[in-house]
Image (cartoon, rainbow, N blue to C red):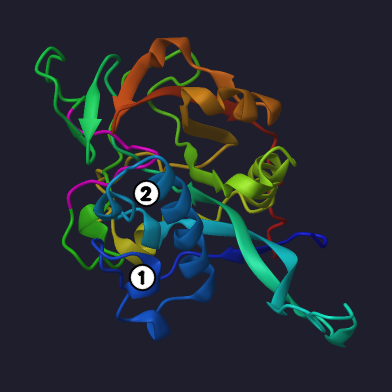
């Protein structure tokens, strides 16, 4: 394997048929290659390996996210060597070529987010399904790490699918009010695990956001307070270095190596049969110099 390199796709409209895998998307010419590669990795890991339905893998957050894909240069055999069966002499040498292959991905979801998941909640396709979890104003929808809210088959950017800026329940590392960004859909193909690829992806995304802290800050002048789900005259949400992730329990150590801490008060919940825990990370941001 050659030295990996990472590609960034900033938020962009994404025509996507939720029921179809990446290779069968009908509008491939309109879909950025980086996102196709991200979905190829996600489908391999979450759909084929973890048996999550293909229709649940793309969600309404994807068009408003930043996506990173890490590639490896892999030498692949095009045709094997041909030898003389009687003498063993090589008649034609093996032919090979080096190809860049997507091996991992992560995405960054900007604020606002749906409420924190319910401790003990069971979520299927983003919906709380177990009746033992009491419904409240803050527990109706999970911003899941692998499962979308219900959407139409083809999804593009739309302010109507974006949550509003509303207070959430406070937890160990979140006061319920501060805007945070969420890392998720972290996936590495099986043959490249154990090489630090996941950590490299997470650190790249964290460093990019740290250097672009106002990238997702909302602009009432551009969109208006109503479309942002805010009351006019209220304080404008501003990101100040807080990251969240909804980690599969088996991946907690990976996130901990990147500095994330488990939020005990968020509890444990199930998404598509997989236990998840909430985790947070605080970083110092680099504020851009204002031009006068």
Residue 132 lies, in percent from the top left, at: 12, 12
Q: Residue at x 37, y 16 (%)?
A: 268
Q: Main secondary structure of the magenta part?
A: loop
Above or below: residue 202 compared with residue 153: above
Q: Secondary structure at mark 2?
A: helix
Label located before the other in sequence (1 or 2): 1
Residue 126 lies, in percent from the top left, at: 23, 38
User: Is 131 displayed left or right of 66 in the figure?
Assistant: left
Q: Label for residue 267?
A: none
Residue 50 lies, in percent from the top left, at: 39, 39
Q: Secondary structure at mark 1?
A: loop
Is residue 49 in sight in this rendering? yes
In 3D space, how far apart are the residues under numbered discs 1 and 2 (Cα atoms)? Answer: 20 Å
Above or below: residue 183 compared with residue 104: above
Magenta stretch bounds: 140-150
Residue 194 lies, in percent from the top left, at: 71, 37
Q: Which quadrant of the structure image shows residue 164? A: top left
Closest to the observer, 100 or 61: 100
Q: How many residues crowd around disc 2 within 10 Å: few (fewer than 14), some, or many (20 or more)?
A: some
Q: Residue at x 44, y 48 (%)?
A: 110
User: Is 11 displayed left or right of 166 in the figure?
Assistant: right
Residue 290 in the magenta stretch? The answer is no
The residue wearing badge 2 is 47
> Looking at the figure, which quarter contains the C terminus?
bottom right
> Looking at the figure, which quarter contains the N terminus?
bottom right
The residue wearing badge 1 is 14
Q: Which quadrant of the structure image shows residue 203? A: top right
């Amino acid at each position: 394997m050659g030295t990996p390199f990472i590609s960034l796709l900033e938020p962009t409209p994404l025509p996507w048929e939720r029921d179809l895998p990446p290779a069968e998307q009908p509008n491939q010419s309109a879909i950025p290659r980086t996102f196709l590669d991200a979905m190829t990795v996600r489908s391999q890991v979450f759909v084929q390996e973890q048996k999550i339905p293909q229709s649940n893998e793309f969600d309404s957050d994807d068009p408003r996210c930043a996506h990173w894909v890490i590639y490896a240069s892999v030498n692949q055999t095009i045709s094997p060597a041909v030898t003389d069966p009687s003498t063993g002499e090589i008649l034609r040498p093996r032919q090979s070529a080096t190809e860049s292959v997507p091996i991992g991905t992560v995405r960054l979801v900007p604020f606002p987010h749906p409420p924190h998941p319910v401790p003990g909640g069971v979520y299927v396709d983003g919906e709380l399904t177990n009746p033992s979890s009491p419904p409240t104003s803050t527990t109706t929808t999970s911003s899941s790490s692998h499962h979308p809210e219900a959407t139409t088959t083809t999804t593009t950017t739309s302010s109507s699918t974006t949550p509003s800026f509303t207070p959430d329940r406070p937890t160990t590392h979140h006061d319920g009010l501060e805007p945070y960004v969420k890392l998720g859909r972290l996936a590495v193909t099986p043959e490249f695990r154990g090489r630090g690829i996941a950590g490299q992806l997470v650190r790249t995304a964290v460093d990019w956001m740290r250097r672009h802290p106002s990238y997702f800050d909302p602009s009432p002048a551009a969109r208006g307070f109503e479309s942002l789900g805010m009351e006019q005259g209220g304080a404008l949400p501003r990101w100040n270095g807080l990251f969240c992730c909804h980690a599969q329990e088996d991946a907690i150590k990976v996130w901990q190596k990147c500095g994330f801490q488990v939020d005990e008060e968020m509890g444990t919940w199930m998404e598509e049969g997989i236990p998840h825990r909430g985790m947070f990370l605080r970083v110092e941001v680099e504020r851009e110099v204002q031009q006068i």
